[in-house]
Amino acid sequence: MRDVFLMAGFAFLGAAAAGLLGALALRLVRGRSVAVSLAVVAAVAVTAMLTGTLAVAWAMFLSPHDLTVVTTVCAMAAVVSLATALLLGRWVVARSNALALAARSFGDGGSFAAPDGQATAELAALGRELAATSAKLAASRERERALESSRRELVAWISHDLRTPLAGLRAMSEALEDGVAPDPDRYLRRIRTEVERLNTMVGDLFELSRIHAGALSLAPTRISIYDLVGDALAGVDPLARELGVQLIGDRVDRIPVEVDGKEMTRVLGNLLVNAVRRTPADGTVAVSAERQADTVVLSVTDGCGGIPEEDLPRVFDTGWRGSDARTPPAGAGLGLAIVRGIVEAHDGQAAVHNVDGGCRFEVRLPAAVTS
């Protein structure tokens, strides 16, 4: 038994010495290719085995012939192991290079496609992660393109909508200044109307900037959706009478909600004004509110004739106003974007879909918890 422990001790010391040298070698080549690291690992394993075997062989005082045989066998094993490690390293490096080349494509604006052929489990997992990242990046690019397109449209439309009233204000002010206005009082009333229109547009832009910046502060209170709809209908009734549109709000349940009354009144006002302006004379705009499970569904149905299916996903985009035929004179494409921003700030959802003869805007809000 003593001889066994002695041989184990010699083998351990020889293998430990080879392991320490191998660890130093790995530290020196840590910045090199994985093929070099694999070759060093294989060399360490074979060298540790060879050193331990030779230490035991010398301790056992083998004959020169037997010692030569043992050394030759270990040397051949070392050659085969190193060759195998190099081939394996080259294969891993080739797969890694192919993966890096494929990853570079979606970094330059393309999409990632994992290279064909088998790969190690780690490289396969990395390929799946890169594919998922590529899909997320493509979706992000698409959203960025859509946002940029909305910004360009918004700037173009806002510039147009600002230029028209400003030109009118300038012409009327010059006429008043030169004393050539045929009806000064009418000019003054018109100037006031245009100023209020510009003030409303600036207010919408400010509200939208707060929403996009995440600076919209809410002061939620418990209020009945019935009261919110009633106030909104009263505010839009003069415009509806002027345009000959009938407002219907007899399907509104008395459901409590926890919302910011001022902001939700703005939401309802924007939806109703949008519906009234797009509904022809003698048409109707219907408002309803009902509870579905843990949500309150508030809907505004108009008689606009419907929205093209390809435009439905863009209805709530900033600056979207639809076709010229359906664009109201005072619209800047901000109202529905503000609606979505305020509703989402209340943890709700805003949606639109076509119905017979028009479209229905739906706002889903969390219902208030009943005590």
Image (cartoon, grey):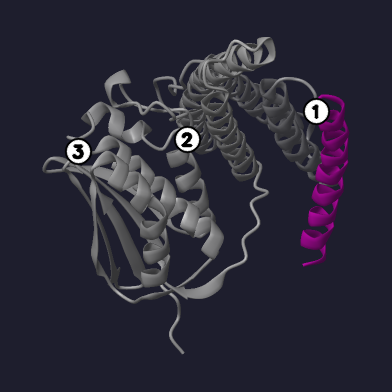
Tag 2–tag 1 contact (CB < 8 Å): no
Residue furthest to the bottom in view is 371
Chief secondary structure of the magenta portion: helix
Q: Which mark is residue 71?
A: none
**Residue nearest the viewer, comparing 240 with 342:** 240
Task: Give the SS element for disc 1.
Answer: loop
Q: Which mark is residue 281?
A: 3
Q: Position of residue 273 (x, y in %)?
A: 37, 44
User: Which residue position is annotated with label 2?
Assistant: 132
Is residue 294 found left or right of 18 in the rendered image? left
Span colored in magenta: 1-29
**Camera sees residue 270:** yes
Task: Give the SS element for disc 3.
Answer: loop
Tag 3–tag 1 contact (CB < 8 Å): no
Magenta highlight on residue 9: yes
Q: Position of residue 69 (x, y in %)?
A: 68, 29
Magenta highlight on residue 77: no
- Residue at point 58% right, 28% down? 188
Is residue 338 found left or right of 279 in the rendered image? right
- Does residue 339 lie above or below 51 as drawn? below
Q: What is the spatial separation of the Cα atoms under label 3 and label 1, in whole angstroms?
A: 79 Å
- Residue at point 62% right, 25% down? 85
